[in-house]
Amino acid sequence: MKNYTFIKVKSIEQLKELAYENQIDCMIQLNGGGYSRKTISHYSDDSWDIFHHISDEWEEFTSTYDFVNDEFYGKFIQEAIEKKALLVYPNSDVCHTYMPKDEEWSESIPVEELLK
């Protein structure tokens, strides 16, 4: 089976860089094998937009501070980063910019691993 390379987000700073003036498609791996799909953007005024595909809702934050201190969505995304469960899809434009030349930014993950 073919391996697809996802970016495993390692910090909020890395997420800021990846999502800066981009819409990146992400997946948060959940316990039990499920996942939560998000589209995340970060802007020059330090604001954030997060689209939650499961609920078809947008969440907007006016600053990184507000985002990381949010008790629900911000906390959920930060926990995913800490657990190495926030992945940027390989079809996101930003993936083609950073992969595969920098091992620190990317990791090859077999599809069957994602489907467990």
Image (cartoon, rainbow, N blue to C red):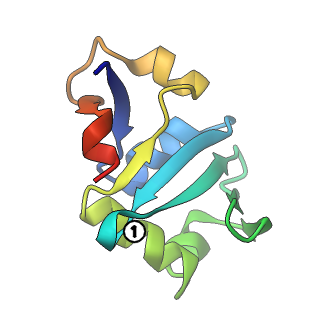
The extreme top residue here reads: 101
The extreme bottom residue here reads: 71
The extreme left residue here reads: 103
Percent coordinates x, y for residue 115 in the rendering: 34, 48
Q: Residue 60 versus residue 1: which sits nearer the camera?
A: 1
Say above or below: 24 vs 107: below
Residue at x 72% of width, y 51% of height: 45
Q: Residue 2 versus residue 45: which sits nearer the camera?
A: 2
Q: Secondary structure at mark 1?
A: helix
Image quarter where the N terminus lies is top left
Q: Residue 56 versus residue 78: which sits nearer the camera?
A: 56
Say above or below: 74 vs 94: below
Q: Quadrant of residue 78?
A: bottom left
The extreme right residue here reads: 57
CA neighbours of label 1 inside 10 A, class few (<14), some (14 to 19), many (20+): many
Q: Quadrant of residue 47?
A: bottom right
Say above or below: 96 vs 104: above
Residue at x 64% of width, y 66% of height: 63
Percent coordinates x, y for residue 18 in the rendering: 50, 37
Residue at x 26% of width, y 64% of height: 82
Residue named by callout 1: 78
Is 11 left, or right, of 40 in this rendering?
left
Q: Amino acid at mark 1?
A: Gln
Is 53 left, or right, of 98 in this rendering?
right
Percent coordinates x, y for residue 50 in the rendering: 68, 60
Q: Residue 88 versus residue 20: which sits nearer the camera?
A: 88
Residue at x 41% of width, y 20% of height: 98
